[in-house]
Amino acid sequence: MKSKRRKQSATLARPNAPKPARSRHEAGNLPVVSVDAIPRWQHAVVLVGFLLLNLLLYQRTFGIGFLSVDDGDYVQNNPYIGSLHAATLKPIFTAPYFANYAPANLLSYALDVALAGGRSAFAFHLSNVLWHGAAVCLVYLLALTMGAEILPAAAAALLFLLHPAHVEVVAWISSRKDLVATAFAVLSMICYLRYRRQQPDGQRDYSVAWYAASVAAFVVASAAKQSVLLLPAVMLAWDIIVERRRGWRMAADKIPFGLAAMFFGWMTWNAQPATGQALRPFVLAATEFANLWLLTGMGNYVLYRAAPDPAAWGAIARFALIIAATLVWVLPLLLWRPKSPSAGTPAPALCYWVLVQMVPPMLLSFIVPITDRYLFLPSVGFCLLLVNVALSVERDRLPSIVGISENQKSKIKIRKFCA
């Protein structure tokens, strides 16, 4: 027994003793996935609660009927959604419709018609509300996958559920594409983060399956609306900032996403008619700040807004706004300290979720560049960011409030979500 203890002491004291191999989860500094650590019935209760609250919040939309803006073209007079036969499915997948290539969006309408037995406005509105509920639940699961505890994850999903910018997307049947695209984009991100997680010892590694699911969900999201095409850039930001990945593998696993983005981007570019609007730096800068303000929940939410007017600004003011909009992209990097112990905080990556996901509608130079529906996917990152920042502030205040010393503070287990 004494000999055995001496051997153990010698092993522990040996300065160059090899360390146990770390899993990819630990090596990549990926947040602990708390979705597996909490009884599933608790998650089920939260998810059912969100679905019921979502129905209660938007039940008044069931009686709105069809709107005169786009609903006639997308739903009432759409020749391809009347049945799920091959004759109608072929053009859905092979040709643009109403200046968009969005087969997943049209399939969702066709499924509504098949289930309702006709083009019922009530059925379309109910479907919109259910899609929104699904997106809320997926935001909750995404927060858990990023490492949040159950209450912060629920807070992020609740903020997303109640965001005033979402009313247009839910109440307007023609905005179904935003609901479908965002739901599958969030699902793709969840699967991607699960792919990056190494299974514990003794369990089967499902990373390849999670990766395939992430790519498949991204393809469906892109087939619903091409505003999600820059999601791989968000994944890349997560890799660099949170996981601190480097090397060719980080870029290689984005290749299938990139190919899908190129295909759907090309289809959209050819489907969209020319707007006659050139890309103007001032309009882009003003749109960026208008979108950020609307994300706060304190804006004026209407169906359409006039484009920013450069003539209403002086030359110096326009230049200052452009510089400020550029600096907004640099600010998240100031929050990121790669050499600090808390380098894995998701806050900078979530900032880029918001900024990157606002870009596609801005680059298409629409006549009306600022609308609530363009903020549906960026608001996912915004709600997660708010909770992350609130947790970080509360963590920093805790020692001074309850009298914890710095040494004791360093021993407190802090979730990676607010590291």
Image (cartoon, rainbow, N blue to C red):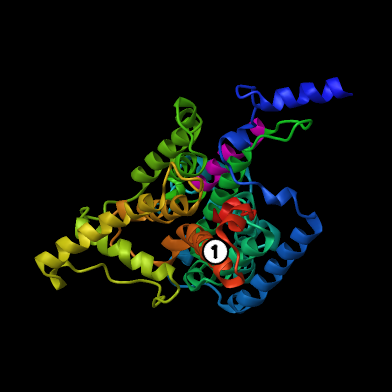
Amino acid bearing label 1 = Val
Of 327 and 95, nearer the camera is 327
- Identify the residue at horizontal 15%, vertical 73% (top origin): 312
Image location of residue 131, percent across then percent down? 61, 60
Dominant SS type (magenta): helix
The extreme left residue here reads 315
Local crowd size for mark 1, using a 10 Å CA cut-off: few (<14), some (14–19), many (≥20): many
State left or right for residue 76 relative to residue 313: right
The extreme right residue here reads 1
| Residue 313 in sight here | yes
- Identify the residue at horizontal 57%, vertical 45% (top origin): 188
Residue 29: quadrant of the picture: top right
Of 250 and 16, nearer the camera is 16
Image location of residue 332, percent across then percent down? 38, 53
Image location of residue 121, percent across then percent down? 59, 70
Question: Quarter of the image containing the N terminus?
Answer: top right
State which region is magenta: 207-223
Q: Secondary structure at mark 1?
A: helix
314 drawn magenta: no
Of 63 and 286, nearer the camera is 286
216 drawn magenta: yes
Residue 251: quadrant of the picture: top left
Residue 194: quadrant of the picture: top right
Question: Number of callouts in the render?
Answer: 1
State left or right for residue 124 relative to residue 265: right
Which residue is the site of mark 1?
Answer: 387
Image location of residue 368, percent across then percent down? 31, 64
